[in-house]
Image (cartoon, grey):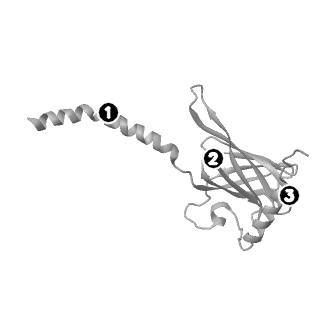
Amino acid sequence: MEILSFSKCLRALRPFTVTALAVAMCFALPSCSYLFTTGVEGSYTATGTPLLGLVASQDERTGGSLTIGSAEKQQCRGEYRVSEIKTNRWKLETGERIYRGRIYCLDGRAGEFKLVSSDKGRTGSITGEIDGQAFQVNLKEWRESDCNSGECRWGLKWTYENERSNSQIYWKVENDHKPNPTGQ
C-alpha cells in the first residue's frame, strides 16, 4: 500500500520536477561561453579590393577579435566589445547585438568597425573604416567541413612565422593612435 501512495506522489510532482529542471537549464545557459572562429569575406568599398579574414570570439558578452587582409597575408587586427544589446518591448533580449571595435594595420593605419549580429556574434556583417577607406565584410561558414587548414576552410594562405614581430608592430600602431586622455 505504501508503494502505491509513493508512486501517486511521484506522478503528482512530475510537472514540478520538469519545470524546475527547465528553469535550472535557463539560468545555466547564459553562463555558457561562446568560443568560435568564423571566416569573413568582403572588400574595400571604394576600390573593390577583396578582404578575407577571421573573427574569433571568447564570449558573447565581451566580444572578440577581427583579423583581415589579402588571401596571402594578414594585414590588420582589431578587437571588439558589445556596445548594444537589442531587446523587445518586454525588455527580453532578442539575440541581436551590436559590437564596436578598433582595428590596427601592419602598415601603420588604424580605424574603427561595427559588427551587427542577430545571433550573438556568430553571423553578421562588419562595416568599418581604416584611415578613411571604408570596408565591409560578412561572417561566413566554412567552405569545406572536412579540412584542417585555413586555406580550404576560409581561403587564407596566411603563415604565422612573423607573429611575434607582427604583434609588436600592432602594439606600436595601437599606442600611436590612442586618443589623448586630456583631449588635446
Which of disc 2 and disc 1 is earlier in sequence?
1
Which quadrant would residue 73 be assigned to in this image? bottom right
Circle 3: residue type: Asp
Q: Which quarter of the image is occupied by the N terminus? A: top left
Residue 113, given in percent of the width and then of the height, sits at 76, 47
Circle 1: residue type: Phe
CA separation, marks 1 and 3? Answer: 60 Å
Q: Residue furthest front?
A: 182
Q: Nearer the viewer, residue 156 or 175?
A: 175
Residue 72 can be seen in this image:
no
Name the residue tied to disc 3. 176
Residue 2 can be seen in this image:
yes
Pointer 2: residues within 10 angstroms few (<14), some, or many (20+)? Answer: many
- Left or right of residue 107: residue 146: left
Q: Nearer the viewer, residue 8 or 43?
A: 8
Name the residue tied to disc 1. 16
Residue 133, given in percent of the width and then of the height, sits at 86, 50
Residue 51, given in percent of the width and then of the height, sits at 76, 56
Rendered residue at 36%/34% (across/down): 19
Name the residue tied to disc 2. 121
Residue 159, given in percent of the width and then of the height, sits at 71, 71
Tell me the element at label 1.
helix
Pointer 1: residues within 10 angstroms few (<14), some, or many (20+)? Answer: few
Circle 2: residue type: Gly
Residue 99 versus residue 78 in the image, above or below: above
CA separation, marks 3 and 2? Answer: 29 Å
Rendered residue at 46%/44% (across/down): 28
Disc 1 versus disc 3: nearer the observer: 3
